[in-house]
Amino acid sequence: MLLSIEPAIDQEIDIQPGVPINLPIQIRPAEQQDYAFILASWSNDAHKIKYDSFIPNSIFFPRQKSFINKILSNSIINIAHVEGDRDLICGYLVIEPKFQMNTLLIHWAHTKPIYRRQGVYKALLNNYIGLEDPITVVTSPFTLLPEFKSKYNVIYDPTHVDHLRAQ
């Protein structure tokens, strides 16, 4: 599926995050070679979260790796990449549909800084079709959660993954 994110204004491509660009992207399922990037970016971003940043690296990263791998084993991971270059990743989305509860769990999303505010996350989210009018639950905090929560009517509930942390 080819998606084109149109620029808000005509201008040259700039390397600063948030500057509107014309970015033709494609969405594909994650492949084995993507997992190192997913694990590293998710772990590093999570360690920057307010309270997690106080946990020493030697404790945080091994536990986080185990936690992420448990989530990934039951999830759908979609990758947004620049059209024509499957390895030039713009971002990814980790979701878990719970069909019996008509619920979509959004576990994590990451967009590389240079591609932020370009609609990559929206394209990833809109690409998923599987539940009709689901209850959408975000299980991890992220910077845009307040904006996202009101715009898309989602629930923030990290308790959906507590059982994975305890194992």
Image (tube, rainbow, N blue to C red):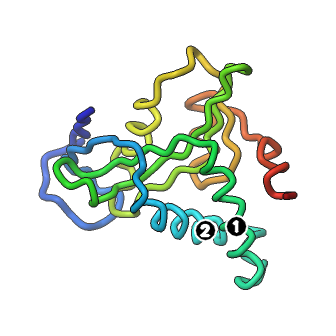
Q: Nearer the viewer, residue 146 or 167?
A: 167
Residue 146: image quadrant is top right
Looking at marks 1 and 2 on the same chain, the residue that comes earlier in the sequence is marked by 2
> How crowded is the residue under tag 2: few (<14 C-alpha within 10 Å), some, or many (20+)?
some
Q: Position of residue 83 (x, y in %)?
A: 20, 47
Give the mark count: 2
Q: Which mark is residue 43?
A: 2
Helix, strand or loop at mark 1 = helix
Q: Quadrant of the N terminus?
A: top left
Up-down relation of residue 163 to residue 62 (above or below): above
Q: Nearer the viewer, residue 85 or 144?
A: 85
Left-right relation of 110 to 62: left
Residue located at (40% from left, 31% from top): 127
Q: Which mark is residue 64?
A: 1
Residue located at (45% from left, 66% from top): 37
Q: Position of residue 70 (x, y in %)?
A: 69, 54
Q: Is the Cβ of the residue at disc 1 closer than 8 Å to that at disc 2?
A: yes
Residue located at (40% from left, 53% from top): 31
Residue located at (58% from left, 66% from top): 45
Left-right relation of 128 to 1: right
Of the residues shown, which amino acid type is indicated by label 2?
Ser
Helix, strand or loop at mark 2 = helix
Q: Quadrant of the C terminus?
A: bottom right
Q: Position of residue 66 (x, y in %)?
A: 70, 64
